[in-house]
């Protein structure tokens, strides 16, 4: 069933802050096999001009995707999450995410489309730190695939 | 900003050092824990096949994380990445053996922009198939 177009433009309340920890960044860097010292060594990060260790570019997705869960699980929207695949992902960074950040995400539905029975939804997540400074914007396209014909 | 490559160093067509990133089932379990994405298509072969996949597949976000390493390794400071976007076109299939899958990434400077920024276009393949589309990053150089 086609999704309701009236959801376009809807924003959801900002999420409770996610506190970015040094050890969580380290765990992520190890998981992607990246030994760049700016992810794990505060001195190396300072030498690169950062106040503390920074996170790899895609780290923030875990936070924005959790926030997008508000949209995905909105019973009024009625997205069939069991059939959802990740279509596109884009980030625009005002600055890197770093240890000590307390990040809050405001999710907005940018577009809702139905194509060949697939429901497609574009969600924009605006990420701000505790001082209200914009850190990164994440655009996530989710595709809920049409059920196969019986 | 501590980009080790300067704007004057590069021209359109400059190729970045390529990268080759192995991915096994163990890699995916570790990434699931670090990212919080426990979708069983990334670790449970029976489940993956039931939903029509050829086998367990890598998280798209894992592939996206590996691809940008070609850029961050090149520029030195990952904080130099201003924009990064991809389309997930094909899954990276990860067989249950010692070798697993391999993600191969090449990149080149596609455009020189204002403010010492450049656009880098990335190509990521696995088993000879392109796995990312429209993979582009904008990077601030020194």
Image: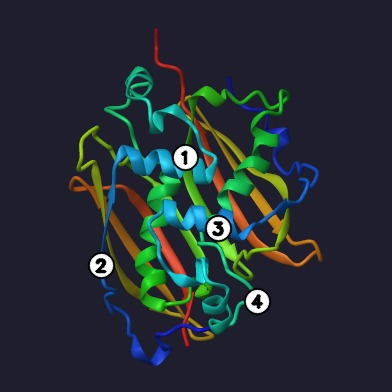
Give the residue at x 33% y 19%: B46
Number of numbered discs visible in the structure rendering? 4
Residue occupied by mark 3 = A25
Where does label 2 land, which residue?
Answer: B18
Residue for point 42% across, 73% down = B119
The picture places residue A32, in percent across and down from the top left corner, at 41, 54
Q: Residues within 10 Å of mark 1 (few under 14, many from 20)?
A: many
Q: x, y percentage for residue A21? A: 64, 57
Cα gap from disc 1 to disc 4, whole angstroms? 28 Å
Q: Which residue is mark 4?
A: A51
Q: Secondary structure at mark 3?
A: helix
| Element under disc 4 | loop
Locate residue A109: give its quadrant.
Answer: top right
Query: Which residue is found at the position 70% from the left and 46% from the top?
Result: A107
Q: Chain of mark 1?
A: B
Question: Where's residue B52, x and y in %?
Answer: 33, 22
Looking at the rendered structure, which numbered label has been put on residue B125? none
| Residue at mark 1 to residue at mark 2: CA–CA distance | 26 Å
Q: How far apart are the alpha carbons under marks 3 and 4?
A: 15 Å
Which quadrant of the structure image shows residue A121? top right
Chain bearing tag 4 is A
Q: Are marks 4 and 2 on the same chain?
A: no
Q: Callout 1: helix, strand or loop? A: helix
User: Badge 3: few (under 14), some or many (20 or more) residues near its Cα, within 10 Å?
Assistant: many
Judged left or right of residue A120, residue A103 is: right
Asked whether disc 1 touches disc 4, contact meaning CB atoms under 8 Å apart, the reply is no
């Amino acid at each position: 069933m086609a999704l309701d177009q009236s959801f376009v433009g809807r924003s959801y309340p900002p999420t409770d802050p996610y506190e970015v920890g040094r050890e969580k960044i380290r765990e992520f860097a190890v998981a992607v096999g990246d030994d760049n010292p700016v992810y794990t060594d505060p001195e190396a990060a300072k030498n690169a001009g950062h106040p503390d260790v920074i996170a790899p570019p895609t780290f923030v997705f875990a936070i924005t995707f959790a926030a997008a869960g508000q949209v995905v699980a909105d019973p009024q929207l009625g997205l069939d999450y069991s059939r959802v695949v990740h279509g596109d992902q884009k980030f625009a960074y005002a600055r890197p995410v770093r240890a000590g950040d307390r990040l809050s995400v405001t999710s907005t539905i940018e577009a809702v489309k139905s194509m060949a029975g697939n429901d497609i939804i574009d969600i924009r997540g605006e990420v701000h730190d505790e001082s209200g400074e914009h850190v990164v914007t994440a655009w996530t396209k989710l595709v809920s695939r049409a059920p196969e014909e019986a | 900003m501590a980009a080790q490559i300067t704007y004057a160093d590069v021209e359109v067509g400059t190729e970045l050092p390529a990268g080759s990133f192995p991915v096994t089932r163990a890699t995916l379990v570790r990434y699931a824990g670090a990212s919080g994405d426990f979708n069983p298509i990334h670790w449970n072969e029976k489940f993956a096949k039931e939903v029509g996949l050829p086998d367990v597949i890598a998280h798209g976000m894992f592939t996206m994380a590996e691809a940008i390493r070609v850029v961050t390794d090149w520029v030195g400071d990952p904080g130099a990445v201003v924009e990064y976007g991809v389309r997930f076109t094909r899954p990276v299939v990860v067989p249950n053996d010692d070798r697993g899958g391999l993600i191969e990434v090449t990149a080149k400077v596609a455009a020189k922009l204002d403010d010492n920024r450049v656009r880098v276009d990335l190509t990521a393949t696995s088993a000879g198939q392109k796995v990312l589309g429209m993979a582009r990053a904008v990077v601030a150089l020194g």
